[in-house]
Amino acid sequence: MKTFCSVWLLLSLVELSPAPPASQEPPLACTGAPDPAPPQPETAEDMASTGDLEPTHYPARRAAQVALHYLNTHHGSPFRVFGLQQVHKASAEDVAAGGRKYKLDFSVTDWGSGSAGPALRCSADVLFPRTERHSAPKVELHCEALQQINSTAQEDDAFYQKYISPDSTVSARDIPDSFGNMSEEMQPFWRLARVAASFIMLRESSENTEFNMAKVASITQQESSEEQLMLEFVVLLHDFPSQEIVQWKLLASWSPDRGVRVLQTEWQPRCPHATKPPN
Amino acid sequence: MILARKFYSSKMKGLLVLTALFVAVFGKKTFEGDQVLRITAKNEAQIFLLKELSEQEHLGLDFWREPVHESLPVDVYVPFHSLQAVRVFLRYNQIQYNVMIMDVQDLLDDEEREMVKYRTIPRSTDDFVYTAYHDLNSIYSFMDMLVAENSNLVSKIVIGQSYENRPLNVLKFSTGANRPGIWFDTGIHSREWVTQASGIWFAKKIVTDYGRDPVLTDILNNYDIFLEIVTNPDGFAYTHSRDRMWRKTRKPNSGSSCVGVDPNRNWDAGFGGGGSSSNPCTETYRGPSAHSEPEVKAIVDFVKSHGKLKAFVSIHSYSQMLLYPYGYTSTPAKDKAELHELAKKAIASLQSLYNTRYTYGSIITTIYQADGITVDWTYEQGIKYSYTFELRDTGRYGFLLPADQIIPTAEETWLALMAIMEHTKNNPY
């Protein structure tokens, strides 16, 4: 018991930082050695996660969320961001090269068109590789009628024209604010941030994560380059299984022609837990 | 008199010019740009002109002080569309004036702001703004008001103190002694603001519906309802003052600079398993030992000493789910079939209101493995109808749910809670 206590005491003295993102070497902004990704035991449930899956349960849902991030990186814009509506069917199998491949049949809705938007039916193959170091899942996606949903070209162009001017210096914080408020003007920026964040969420995903964007901490417009709107975002991502809030700074470009591209990403350890209460 | 008539004829021309100058009347919804002028007539002739002016109906003037005598000031409200014309008229006739109110709308806005400031301290639970998020003091005041207004039905029990010595308040709704009980808690994770907001709404709903809704009345005539609205007050205060995303308690951890324990991993059911963390710097840190957190211990003590709770619902957000035990093991709960059927019924009721889609199932299969959670412990204490809710939404706004969704969320969730309560009442054990 004594040895246990001293070992426990020793362990608790090691200041462990919040779990760094899977794909990046963490800077030592929080004191102490970086924690390796928290162990995810293979429970009986995990082993059973092959074959047909319950579409409303988490293994299918996490894979569908990955497919959703992929969809948004390819088709998201200031006036179009997709959200997962429902998973209809799902199955998984272990693949020869190592890894697990999910086959999904699901529906998404466009948050840009309000709650009245029609659901889009999609099918996807999502492969989570099993490698020493984390590597991004691979997605093959097909959504029916993607080209037929109402084009946002007009709004995209108007938005682009408004902000591409050299005088434009958009700068904002806390979108939405603590009360969920977001001005009309900020909505396209929020969507752009969500699309840009999808690149990161896609890259960082595994079978043990389920990411959403919790909020945009800041937006700072940079000088336009090569006729692209340049935006620096700081976003807070929420991972469901660990409940962690992960902060990323990123630089993204957008234009109606080229869509969203993410040029730089930087994990910003927050260490919110590492604050002593005021005495 | 003759002099006046002479003035009249040439000055009438001025008035006609004025009328000619007058452009279209704008429909008005606000008082923007309207002014109030104080005019000082220096002789009877000017008074006469002002009287003529007052008869020009199309100008929409309102004389707060009529032109009577040159020794008395004339105050006139001038709508924006007539301002130009009136000023020209006054200058043309060399009638002195100054601007008393530069912009009537500004004045009204300031007044409104003052009134709102005065109004935001509600004087009763009917005054309380259910469509907004409130801070801890407001919520505690609400509780006291509710008790004061319904002292025959509601009382407040303090089941303990938080780490930072805030009272842990539970509202008890009771119509008789020695009854079995039903428990709801909201806000155990402080950043899940829609839950505390819904808890406030539930409290008001209960007092409103008792004696009016036959189902609720029947329930309350047989069971007590206990409602802990702010289950983690330290965390909640912190979400207002420092970090909107704070989840845990605010108790420091010895040997670490990281603060806080996940109150929903701190219960003595599968405590210490892989579905919780041993790292104080993480969101799912389980704490040094089961029930180490005073916020958790207070509920444990209450449940044990009450001894007759028959349903226990712990409310979280987000992801739109209704979940039953277990989180720490994949062994199905003994009552799984019944819990599953009841969940299905409760969700159908919920969905009937706004078509909000919910998922349901056991915690470990539906959401993730989670060890040391509230409802696993309450279930193992023998409280069969132990459920966890995850309210709106599914990730679009997440924790930052816009306030206009508070009431719809509370309304639909209430239907599910009623289904659970009704089933509990109809299936005594």
Image (tube, rainbow, N blue to C red):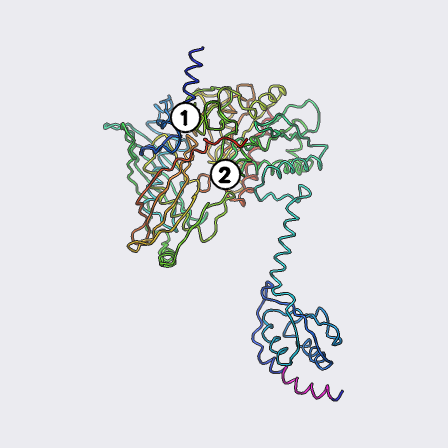
The quadrant of the rendering that contains the N terminus of chain A is: top left
| Residue at x 37% of width, y 32% of height | A209
Q: Quadrant of residue B223?
A: top right
Q: Chain of mark 2?
A: B
Label placed on residue A15: 1
Is residue B420 shown above or below A172? above
Q: Nearer the viewer, residue A107 or A202?
A: A202
Main SS of residues in magenta: helix
The quadrant of the rendering that contains the C terminus of chain A is: top right
Q: Amino acid at mark 2?
A: Arg
Indicate left or right for A135 with B232 as reference. left
Q: Nearer the viewer, residue B99 or B275?
A: B99
Q: Quadrant of residue A136?
A: top left
The residue labelled by disc 2 is B244
Indicate left or right for B26 with A162 as reference. right
* Residue density around tag 2, few if under 14, some if 14–19, many if 20 or more, within 10 Å: many
SS at mark 1 in the image: loop
Of badges 2 and 1, nearer the viewer stands 1
| Residue at x 63% of width, y 85% of height | B13
Confirm whether the magenta stretch covers residue B100. Answer: no
Name the spot of residue B72 as percent of width and height, x first: 74, 73
Name the spot of residue B255 as percent of width and height, x first: 46, 23
Is residue B349 shown above or below B18? above
Q: CA distance from mark 2 to mark 1?
A: 24 Å
Indicate left or right for B365 with B153 as reference. left
Q: Amino acid at mark 1?
A: Glu
Name the spot of residue A55 as percent of width and height, x first: 39, 33
| Residue at x 38% of width, y 41% of height | A107
Q: How many marks?
A: 2
Q: Nearer the viewer, residue B329 or B25?
A: B25
Q: Which residues are magenta?
A: B3-14
Q: Same chain, marks 2 and 1? A: no
